[in-house]
Image: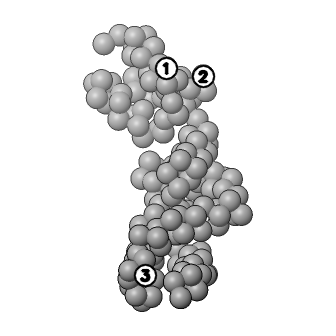
Amino acid sequence: MNLDIVLSKMRRYCAYRERSHKEVRYKLVEMKVYGMDLERIMTQLIEEDFLNELRYARAYVSGKFRMNKWGRNKILLGLKQQSISPYCIKKAMEEIDAVEYNAVLYQLLEKKIRQYSKDDVYSKRNKLIKYALGRGYNMNEMMSHIEALINKDQTISR
């Protein structure tokens, strides 16, 4: 395939949404572009700012946190799976506001505890912990919220 055509397709591919270097490489290999041709296209996309690792990392963090309400651990894992550099990961993760992060975690747990109204305290606590861990939050972040919600729930049910 002609390199100008491939480059044009890759520009459109990258312009549609932010892409990681790994995604673009995979797409080029799918298009049967290898070796020096692949590297030339990657370099061209980077120079033309169609491909920017830091911008991708920031968009990924913002989207996964605000839209999917993922915790730091799950977001971090996703970035590492995309082979994002530690520097870009650090810079992107710094953009998560701590107050907003805690508020989102509290809202998630508050919504979830309503589903466990018939369960005993021990069972509620375990289910909330499993849920929050699955969403990518760590124990230190969640335990104070879980205890507060369980105490609030017990007060209401009396």
The residue under label 2 is 48
* Residue 19 in picture, x, y percent from top left: 49, 35
Along the viewing direction, whichever of 158 and 115 lies nearer the viewer:
158
Q: Earlier in the sequence, mark 3 or mark 1?
A: 1
* Residue 57 in picture, x, y percent from top left: 57, 45
Question: Left or right: 66 with respect to 12?
Answer: right
The numbered mark at residue 97 is none
- In the displayed structure, 113 sits above or below 101; it is below
Question: Looking at numbered disc 2 in the image, what kind of residue is underneath it?
Answer: Glu
State whether residue 88 appears in this view: no
Residue drawn at x 45%, y 54% as measured from the top left:
78
Residue that sits furthest to the front in the current view: 158
Question: Looking at numbered disc 3 in the image, what kind of residue is underneath it?
Answer: Lys
Hey, which quadrant is residue 99 in on the image?
bottom right
The residue under label 3 is 124
Q: What element carries label 3?
A: helix
Q: Which of marks 3 and 2 is nearer the N terminus?
A: 2
The residue under label 1 is 11
Q: Residues within 10 Å of mark 3 (few under 14, many from 20)?
A: many
Residue drawn at x 58%, y 64% as measured from the top left:
107
Q: Distance between the residues labelled 3 and 1?
A: 50 Å
User: Decide: marks 1, 2 in contact (CB < 8 A)?
Assistant: yes
State whether residue 21 appears in this view: yes
Question: Looking at numbered disc 1 in the image, what kind of residue is underneath it?
Answer: Arg
Q: Distance between the residues labelled 3 and 2?
A: 52 Å
Query: Is label 1 or label 2 in front?
Result: 1
